[in-house]
Image (cartoon, helix red, strand yellow):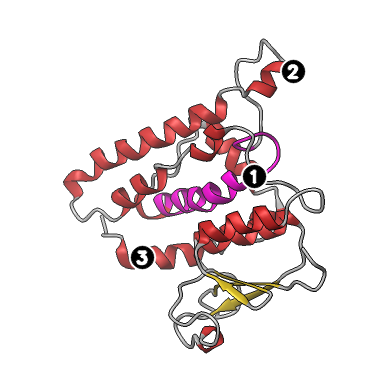
Amino acid sequence: MAETSKLQLFVKASEDGESVGHCPSCQRLFMVLLLKGVPFTLTTVDTRRSLDVLKDFAPGSQLPILLYDGEARTDTLQIEEFLEETLGPPGFPSLTPCYRESAMAGNDVFHRFSAFIKNPAPAQDDALYQLLLRALTRLDSYLRTPLEHELVREPQLRESRRRFLDGDQLTLADCGLLPKLYIVDTVCAHFRQAPIPDELRGIRRYLDSALQEKEFKYTCPHSAEILAAYRPVVHPR
């Protein structure tokens, strides 16, 4: 990337209109830029008030938005691909997972969570929760299964000790999954008294590891922001 290039990321603002708000896609790209170690400007946008800040270059677009040398990019997946291609080695670290399975792990968790937490019929709660639990269990199994490079070092290793999906470093796979997984744990614990079970120790280790990393901890909205976003769509029990 040329030294004159300028990056600006626009993300959803919190209830106070200034800090980072609830938006897993915004957090995803925020994490990617921090992990890349590239200078950029973060702008929080209060979507309840005025979107005038966006009208000149991305009218009608939803957040997040990346402005690169004055050109607006509005599709999260395409932005992620663009950043990985543009900000690659040797100047910047590659964030692409080594294992294809890492990019797919947990890809059905958020869908199952949404069906469970937004369900209007109490009689269906248990069945929907079981589907969510199965999705979480599959993710937990992946996190606990040693990867090839772990077995090369320790052929007798029975359970993985890695911190993240693909190893001990955060990758694009984690940037996509962790913000959503944190929402699942926070919302289910508050509204359904059903946090991700401690028995799923691979996931608990994964979340604990993430909260030790500034790229995740610094980009996380406050729990109150997440709960406020879900309160209108969760039916009381």
As drawn, 106 above or below 59: above
Please tell me in which quadrant of the rendered image residue 234 appears.
Answer: bottom left
Location of residue 216 in the rendering, given as x and y in whole percent from the top left corner: 64, 54
At numbered mark 1, what does the secondary structure look like: helix, strand or loop?
loop
Location of residue 12 in the rendering, given as x and y in whole percent from the top left corner: 53, 72
The magenta stretch spans which residues?
164-189
Residue under label 1: 171
- In the figure, is residue 11 to the left or right of 42? left
The amino acid pointed to by label 2 is: Arg
Q: Earlier in the sequence, mark 3 or mark 1?
A: 1
Front position among marks 3 and 2: 2
Spatial CA distance of label 2 from label 1 is: 21 Å
The amino acid pointed to by label 1 is: Thr
As drawn, 60 above or below 193: below
Residue under label 3: 231
At numbered mark 3, what does the secondary structure look like: helix, strand or loop?
helix
Q: Crowding near pointer 1: few (<14 within 10 Å), some, many (20+)?
A: many
- In the figure, is residue 46 to the left or right of 41? left
Location of residue 115 in the rendering, given as x and y in whole percent from the top left corner: 29, 50
The verdict on residue 171 being magenta is yes
The amino acid pointed to by label 3 is: Arg
Please tell me in which quadrant of the rendered image residue 146 appears.
Answer: top right
The answer, for residue 220, to whether it is visible in the render is no
Q: Crowding near pointer 3: few (<14 within 10 Å), some, many (20+)?
A: few
Q: Earlier in the sequence, mark 3 or mark 2?
A: 2
As drawn, 187 above or below 225: above
Residue under label 2: 153
Q: Earlier in the sequence, mark 2 or mark 1?
A: 2
